[in-house]
Amino acid sequence: MTRVAIIGVGLAGLTLAHALRDRAAVALFEKARGVGGRMATRYADPWQFDHGAQFFTAQTEAFRRFLQPAIEAGAVARWDARFAEFDGPDQAAHWQWGAERPHYVGAPKMNALAKYLADGLDIRLATRIGSVEPAGNAWALADEAGADLGRFDWCVSTAPAPQTLSLLPESFAHRTAIADAPMRACFALMLGFDDPLPFDWDAAHVGNADISWMSVNSAKPGRDTAPSLLVHSTNAWADAHLDDDPEAVTAYLIVEASRVTGHDLGAAPHIALHRWRYANLPKRSGAPALIDPANRLAACGDWCIHGRVEAAFTSATALAGALAPLL
Ligand SMILES: Cc1cc2nc3c(=O)[nH]c(=O)nc-3n(C[C@H](O)[C@H](O)[C@H](O)COP(=O)(O)OP(=O)(O)OC[C@H]3O[C@@H](n4cnc5c(N)ncnc54)[C@H](O)[C@@H]3O)c2cc1C
């Protein structure tokens, strides 16, 4: 059977593995200790935060079909949030999400969809790929310490574009398309509280501020955790302050979120910050996935299309369609 190595176990890697598992011997490698990539959840008992993707939609029939078993298994749930639009500190609009345009989350945490999909796959966690080198007719993968991880007929990277660029060999035919992907940064501020939050919204977009999003994480379906608020910076602010002192970033984002909500959030008993260097990117035109049959190398991920969960699925599905006849 053709041996396929997939680097990265976010939604793109998992989608691809499911599509190819009956045609090839698929091995997945993930540098983190868990699956899900940017569909991530962090615990700080008694609090829990989805600090990457907040929710996702399913615009295509293909993604809706893909999600259905996970919905039936309870790993994905519809989030009918009370949603607010803020213009600086002013609440400009307020409505409730519903069935007409469903918003989904992993349940009871964002990485639950990835955990559901990971079942039965050959996944090596805590394994950061350090090199992909030619070895006869195959690709030899090694970790950062140089430990041999095996030989593969095909190697596919689903890591964010800049990481894919540094991983795939110089001979890969589509390096320019990867280098052109304009990935943006984002800070996630995590605030845990003892008492319920006094807001009339569960999720909010924010304009005219250096924060872009707030959500009451504990209000998502299936969460049985203490009150928690997740705040995202704008991409522009994060890009400009990427290497600032984390304490200064934390302090600034608390002030900004307090200004927008009209509540002093600095007294939260739990305060943490996460920096996403490669968080998302605007919509791109171009190929939904990159395949180089002569070298038996390929790449896919949200960054081929748009910084969205569904785009990761669509990119991986496009790659699976192109790869399948070649295996
Ligand atoms: C702050 C933030 C907010 C977001 N909000 C939303 C939202 O509300 N709605 C929405 O639809 N989308 C949102 N997104 C985007 C969404 O999370 C992504 O589009 C989607 O999860 C990307 O999936 P992926 O599989 O393409 O990439 P990833 O999930 O990034 O998976 C790639 C994997 O590759 C691994 N990796 C990288 N290098 C190596 C290596 N050398 N060796 C082994 N493994 C490696 C990484 O650890 C990662 O797990 C958000 C993202 C962030 C960060």
Image (cartoon, rainbow, N blue to C red):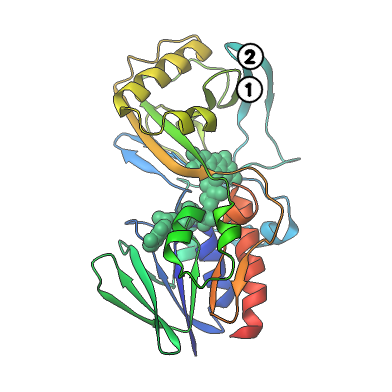
From mark 1 to mark 2, how far is it between C-alphas?
Answer: 7 Å
Q: Amino acid at mark 1?
A: Ala
Do the numbered discs 1 and 2 sit on residues whose CB atoms are within 8 Å? yes
**What residue is disc 2 on?**
91
* Residue 221 visible in this rendered orientation of the protein: no
Residue 139 vs 47, above or below: the answer is: below
Residue drawn at the location 73% of the way across and 41% of the way down: 101
Residue picked out by circle 1: 84
Q: Is residue 186 visible?
A: yes
The x and y percentages for residue 20 are 56, 77
Image vertical order of residue 55 relative to residue 66, above or below: above
Confirm or reject: label 1 Cβ below 8 Å from ligand 1: no
Disc 2 residue type? Gln
Residue 200 in the image, given as x and y percentages of width and height: 57, 18
Q: Is residue 11 left or right of residue 65?
A: left
Q: Residues within 10 Å of mark 1 (few under 14, many from 20)?
A: many
Local secondary structure at mark 2: strand
Residue 322 placed where, x, y %? 66, 75
